[in-house]
Image (cartoon, rainbow, N blue to C red):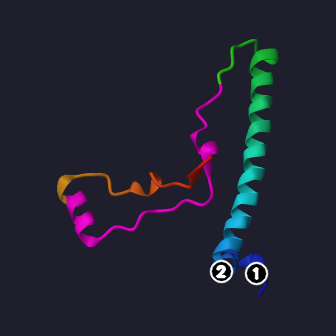
Amino acid sequence: MPCWLYPSRHFGSLEPHKFRDIWLMNEEEMKGLVRKALELDQIIYEQQLGLPWAPPDLWFMDSVGPLTHKKKSASELAEEVILGRDSFSFYQGRGTRK
């Protein structure tokens, strides 16, 4: 079967550095599209609607690379459950900062 039918299977078989290279290329393209969309949004607000424009919070534009998560030991997870902490800390380790 063609690999485009099962992209996750195809990309899962790539070497980690190739996967990261593809991710970074797609991420850079996405960031360029976001910048263009924001420029158009600003033009519509200011020129067409006559409203002040404020850029949204773009925290995700600072991240570089695939999301990562920190592996935790069973005792660390148990401690989080007992103390009621958020166990979804993989968001804290997202990508690397520029």
Mark 1 nearby-residue class (10 Å; few <14, some 14–19, many ≥20): few
Q: Residue 80: where, in percent of width, then height?
A: 24, 58
Q: Residue 21: where, in percent of width, then height?
A: 72, 66
Residue type pointed to by label 2? Arg
Which residue in the protein does label 2 denote?
A: 9
**Separation of residues labelled 1 and 2 (CA atoms):** 8 Å
For image coordinates 68% across by 76% down, the residue present is 11
Residue type pointed to by label 1? Cys
For image coordinates 61% across by 37% down, the residue present is 58
For image coordinates 26% across by 52% down, the residue present is 85
Boundaries of the magenta span = 55-81
Q: Residue 84: where, in percent of width, then height?
A: 22, 52
Quarter of the image with the N terminus is: bottom right
Looking at the picture, does residue 45 appear above or below residue 15?
A: above
Name the quadrant containing residue 73.
Answer: bottom left
SS type, badge 1? helix
- Count all numbered tags in the image, as a single digit: 2
Q: Residue 17: where, in percent of width, then height?
A: 67, 72
Residue, far bottom:
1
Residue, far front:
98
Name the quadrant containing residue 47.
Answer: top right
Which residue in the protein does label 1 denote?
A: 3
Contact, CB < 8 Å: mark 1 with mark 2? Answer: yes
**Is-magenta flag for residue 80?**
yes
In this rendering, position of residue 76 left or right of residue 62: left
In this rendering, position of residue 64 left or right of residue 31: left
**Is-magenta flag for residue 43?**
no
Does label 1 or label 2 sit earlier along the sequence? 1
For image coordinates 67% across by 79% down, the residue present is 15
Q: Out of 18 and 5, give the one closest to the viewer.
A: 18
In this rendering, position of residue 42 left or right of residue 96: right
